[in-house]
Image: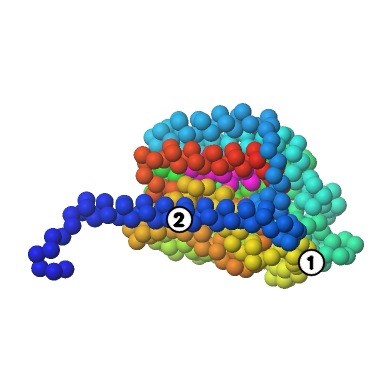
């Protein structure tokens, strides 16, 4: 700095940063809008040359263009109006416990209203009963030990007893869950759908708990409305990935509790975190990336104390499945082979490599995109409560580059996108209602213009 040059005041420096943050936000929105527009337009204008290969009639989303209304339309619109006009002010004054419960309740109501736009049977009770879904195999499981020990032998396709698409494409934890529900008298599509919605939306409360444990209750209050109304909840009601989202979210929340607690409570939470995160990799092979988020959570909490409890618990879960006859690595290699036996061998990565990100942008909504642009500056990167959001984004990038998720990522990446939404805490409070309005409009448009498969 030259002699005599005036040093900017703190307020002037903050004003400059706010100006740059606004520009980054606008740039992120513009680039994302172009990405989504290209992902939508390219299949429409390219004809069968591309449409016949991507196997997604409403690309980049998995569904078909079908403008419609249903029993959930009016409740969804009313929930959206309530969310924009009343919810932010009410949540801003709550203590964290009430905030967590309220976010879960609002997310549950919003999810169910969106699901019911397609009606009870198609929107909730029937989605997991289709021939390629989990419940189609439940009736054939007469012995859980036999199912687990023989699971890998039935992954590869083109054999008489091959598992259906979704059962073969996942470790046995998913099928095991629905078999257990059936055994305890909660069989059928309605119970399975409600299970996914209840566990999935409970993950919203887990995120609030984690942020509070990271010493950021105010950030939790600011992002709570965006969590409760984020567009990705369309696919929580109903897909099994919503269930996975809840399991991972509670695993990470318990890790944060363990890192900030002491004594028996820290140990119990650490073991619980390990069991849930360990079980998550037996729900979806891609959830091994939740390990990145777990390490990020521990770093954000500035404590590695949970690891001596969480790591052995996670390994115990792996050992339990191994002793039952399923070795994760065997299943993973076989599922890669199965993946390329199906339509994935025809879906071009040249399109889905970037269209996946467009689908994710729709799921997280414009507010999250704008907030990510705003948070790209160094001051925001120093805020430890934002690190899980960046970890979620990093996990998505790695998953995308693996080329093992071509399409349907609006649901597959829910365990990561829900954490990305927490970055909305950086949005200016005076603009929160406008951004929340943009979120609910996106959700309503998608759910009423596209007949989503999930």
Residue 294 location (% of width, % of height) = 51, 61
Q: Is residue 49 magenta?
A: no
Residue 400 location (% of width, % of height) = 60, 64
Q: Pick whichever, 209 or 443, lies toward us.
A: 443
Q: Quadrant of residue 386?
A: bottom left
Q: Is residue 64 above or below residue 156?
A: above
Q: How is the image coloured?
A: rainbow
Q: Residue at x 53, y 33 (%)?
A: 80
Disc 1 versus disc 2: distance between alpha carbons? 37 Å
Residue 435 location (% of width, % of height) = 45, 42
As helix, strand or loop, the secondary structure at mark 2 comes to: helix
- Which residue is at the far left? 4
Disc 2 packing (10 Å; few <14; some 14–19; many ≥20)? many
Residue extent of the magenta highlight: 225-238
Tag shown at residue 341: 1
Disc 1 and disc 2 in contact, CB within 8 angstroms: no
Lower position in the chain sequence, tag 1 or tag 2: 2
Q: Quadrant of residue 68?
A: top right
Q: Pick whichever, 382 or 119, lies toward us.
A: 119
Q: Is residue 177 above or below residue 436?
A: below
The residue at which mark 2 appears reads as 28
Q: Is residue 301 visible?
A: no
Q: Is residue 193 left or right of residue 200?
A: right
């Amino acid at each position: 700095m030259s002699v005599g040059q005036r040093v900017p005041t703190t307020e002037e420096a903050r004003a400059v940063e706010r100006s740059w943050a606004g520009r980054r936000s606008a740039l992120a929105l513009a680039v994302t809008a172009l990405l989504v527009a290209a992902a939508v337009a390219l299949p429409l204008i390219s004809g069968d040359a591309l449409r016949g290969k991507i196997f997604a009639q409403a690309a980049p989303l998995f569904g078909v263009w079908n403008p419609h209304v249903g029993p959930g339309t009016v409740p969804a619109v009313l929930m959206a109006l309530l969310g924009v006009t009343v919810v932010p002010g009410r949540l801003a004054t709550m203590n964290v416990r009430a905030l967590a419960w309220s976010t879960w309740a609002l997310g549950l109501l919003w999810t169910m209203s969106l699901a019911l736009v397609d009606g009870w049977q198609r929107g909730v009770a029937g989605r997991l009963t289709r021939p390629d879904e989990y419940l189609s195999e439940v009736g054939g499981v007469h012995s859980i030990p036999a199912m687990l020990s023989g699971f890998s032998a039935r992954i590869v396709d083109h054999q008489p007893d091959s598992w259906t698409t979704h059962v073969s494409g996942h470790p046995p934890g998913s099928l095991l869950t629905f078999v257990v529900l059936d055994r305890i008298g909660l069989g059928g599509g309605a119970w399975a759908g409600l299970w996914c919605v209840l566990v999935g939306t409970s993950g919203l409360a887990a995120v609030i708990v984690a942020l509070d444990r990271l010493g950021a209750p105010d950030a939790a209050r600011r992002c709570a409305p965006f969590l409760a109304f984020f567009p990705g909840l369309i696919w929580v009601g109903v897909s099994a990935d919503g269930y996975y989202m809840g399991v991972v979210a509670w695993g990470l929340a318990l890790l944060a509790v363990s890192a900030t607690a002491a004594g028996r409570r820290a140990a119990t939470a650490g073991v619980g975190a390990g069991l849930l995160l360990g079980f998550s990799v037996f729900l979806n092979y891609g959830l091994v990336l939740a390990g990145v988020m777990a390490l990020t959570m521990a770093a954000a909490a500035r404590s590695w104390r949970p690891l001596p409890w969480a790591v052995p618990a996670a390994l115990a879960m792996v050992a339990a499945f191994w002793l039952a006859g399923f070795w994760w690595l065997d299943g993973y290699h076989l599922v890669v082979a199965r993946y390329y036996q199906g339509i994935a061998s025809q879906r071009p990565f040249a399109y889905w490599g970037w269209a996946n990100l467009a689908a994710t942008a729709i799921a997280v909504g414009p507010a999250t995109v704008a907030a990510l642009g705003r948070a790209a500056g160094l001051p925001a990167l120093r805020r430890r409560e934002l690190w899980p959001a960046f970890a979620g984004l990093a996990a998505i990038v790695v998953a995308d580059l693996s080329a093992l998720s071509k399409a349907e990522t609006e649901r597959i990446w829910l365990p990561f996108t829900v954490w990305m939404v927490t970055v909305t805490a950086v949005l200016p409070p005076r603009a929160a209602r406008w951004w929340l309005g943009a979120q609910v409009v996106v959700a309503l448009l998608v759910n009423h213009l596209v007949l989503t498969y999930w």
